[in-house]
Amino acid sequence: MRKIFIGIVSLIFLLPNVVAANEAALDKIFTPFIEQAMAEHNVQGFVFAVVSKDDVLFQKTFGIKNIYTKEPETSKSLFHMASVTKTFVATALMQLHEQGKLDVDKPVVDILPYFVLVDNRYKNITIRQLASHISGMPDFDSDPWHDPDYDEDALERFVRNFVSHKFLTHEPNTIYQYSNTGYEVLGDVIAKAAGISFEDYVWENILLPLGMVDSTLLIQDADMTRLNSLHRPKDGELKVADIYPYNRAHGPSSTLISNVDDMIRWVRVNLNGGTLDGNRILKRETLKSMWEPASGKFDNVGFGWHRREHKGYQTIYHSGNDGYKSYVNMIPDLDIGFVMMSNTTTQPYHDFAQEIVDKLIKYKGM
């Protein structure tokens, strides 16, 4: 018994040293890499974290929120997460599936009887097909951020008015074709199945239980003093964009506002099989099924998440790009993942994230 006690005490004192060693090693790997990329691409603000299911292994902020005010980035600085929002939509759908309020393998029209396309094949499009981008649903072809909607009826109005005059581009379940439009429909599915607005459902059933209390899908609820400005080249120099990317009609595809502290919790709950700090938002088997190839044949996509094999390891990820750049990437077999956000359109994106994955695999192999 005395040996066990001594071992426990030793572990308590050893653990901070182990965490500090991990942080120092990751700082040495990533800080020069990130600073070089920011300098090369004139990136103004960048935040980054590496986590496991239990710990934050490394976290750091770089640069400034706004080129005019020069206010530095912090872990509370808010970013537009763009299409990373879709992973929250997928989780909400699976929660409602677990509760029996919808069946993701049944047609969308079972929940939205007003969901109609010119193309009669729409009647058989399932929730799962939309969530996996294999429905044949076309994407919207206009700028969604000018003349934005803010009212609660925006999603239903989009489904009724915009979607109704569209044709499918392909037979459902035949090809992968990314579709923001499909996710707007799914947001309306969530609202109708839950009986509350899409934004309220995500807040009450995902963000709040996970302690992601700085995050919101509604711009009017965001702390504007923490919000990053978007920087883009114009007339040969970098300037602050005059329009923030928000439109309630496109909330499910794009409008999550969050910070690195909150997104750390999102990566951790997914690595941890759907639970965090004693709060379970999904069954472990449900979450695992979301990472499987869509329809058993689309290796690049699951249910709301994308898949890519990297050096023998399956990675699960989603990116976002509306000028702001965001990325969440996990390597479940190595119990490690990362989140990054940037406020500059010139920020390196997919290739940059793959370099990070490569460095994490090497780090875990040390």
Image: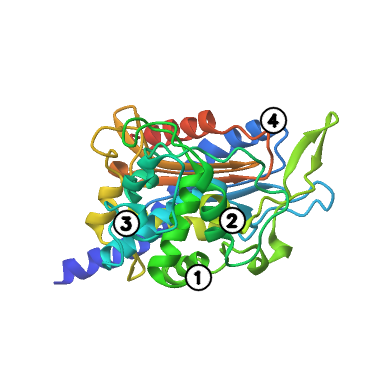
Tell me if label 1 and label 4 are in contact, CB under 8 Å.
no
Judging by the rendered image, the residue that carries numbered circle 4 is 41
Q: Position of residue 21 (x, y in %)?
A: 44, 48
Q: Amino acid at mark 2?
A: Ala
N-term mark: 3 or 2: 2
Judging by the rendered image, the residue that carries numbered circle 3 is 272
**Colour setting:** rainbow
Q: Position of residue 323 (x, y in %)?
A: 66, 41
Q: Position of residue 73 (x, y in %)?
A: 68, 53
Q: CA distance from mark 2 to mark 1?
A: 15 Å
Q: Amino acid at mark 1?
A: Asp
Q: CA distance from mark 4 to mark 2?
A: 32 Å
Judging by the rendered image, the residue that carries numbered circle 1 is 200
317 up-or-down from 8: above or below: above
Q: Specify whether residue 115 is in view.
A: yes
| Left or right: where 272 falls relative to 150 | left
Within-10-Å neighbours for mark 3: few <14, some 14–19, many 20+? some
* Secondary structure beneath label 2: helix
1 or 3: mark nearer the eye:
1
2 or 1: mark nearer the eye:
2
* Secondary structure beneath label 3: loop
